[in-house]
Image (cartoon, rainbow, N blue to C red):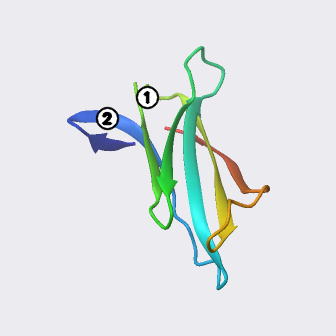
Amino acid sequence: MVQHGGADVVAATVTVADCGWPAAPHVSVACVETAGADTAMQCAQGRGDQPAQVFFAPFVPGATYIATGRGCGSWIGQDPAPRCQQLGPNTATL
């Protein structure tokens, strides 16, 4: 839980790592959802080497949150790779 825009929110970040030439980071995605609730998953996207950071609201004390993400690379000058690195799920009760 963090403060964002004056409100308590749950944050998740996917930070890309260097792929090594001739590959490069293409896109990253970070998502958060509440376990067992009827709330929609919230996601954010980062392009290139920029991290993806999502701020999930509303924050409910005692709720369990699930964070997932993915990172996709590409060969320099070409379309993104068809397979991405899946991340998570990471679960926390806050």
- In the foreground, 1 or 77: 77
Q: Callout 2, which amino acid?
A: Asp
* Percent of width and height locating residue 34: 57, 27
Q: How crowded is mark 1: few (under 14 residues within 10 Å), some or many (20 or more)?
A: few
Position of 27 with respect to 52 (left or right) is right
Q: Residue at x 37, y 36 (%)?
A: 9
Residue drawn at (64%, 27%) of the image: 35
Q: Residue 75 carries which label?
A: none
Residue at 57% in and 28% down: 41
**Residue at label 1?**
61
52, above or below 81, in the image: above
In terms of depth relative to the viewer, which is nearer, 86 or 33? 86
Q: Which of marks 1 and 2 is nearer the N terminus?
A: 2
> Left of 38 or right of it: where is 3?
left
Which type of secondary structure does the marked residue at label 1 adopt? Answer: loop
Q: Residue furthest front?
A: 77
For discs 1 and 2, the disc positioned in front in the rendered view: 2
What SS does tag 2 mark?
strand
Badge 1 amino acid: Pro
Quadrant of residue 7 within the rendered picture: top left
Q: Quadrant of the N terminus?
A: top left
Tell me, yes or no, whether the two marked residues, 1 and 2, touch with CB atoms within 8 Å: no
- Where residue 84 appears, x then y in whole percent? 74, 56
Residue 38 on image: x %, y %: 60, 14
Name the quadrant containing residue 4: top left
User: Within the image, what quadrant is residue 83 found in?
Assistant: bottom right
Q: Which residue is drawn at 66% across and 59% down?
A: 72
Considering every residue shown, the one lying at the far left of the view is 6
Residue 22 placement (x, y as % from top left): 67, 82
The mark found on residue 8 in the picture is 2
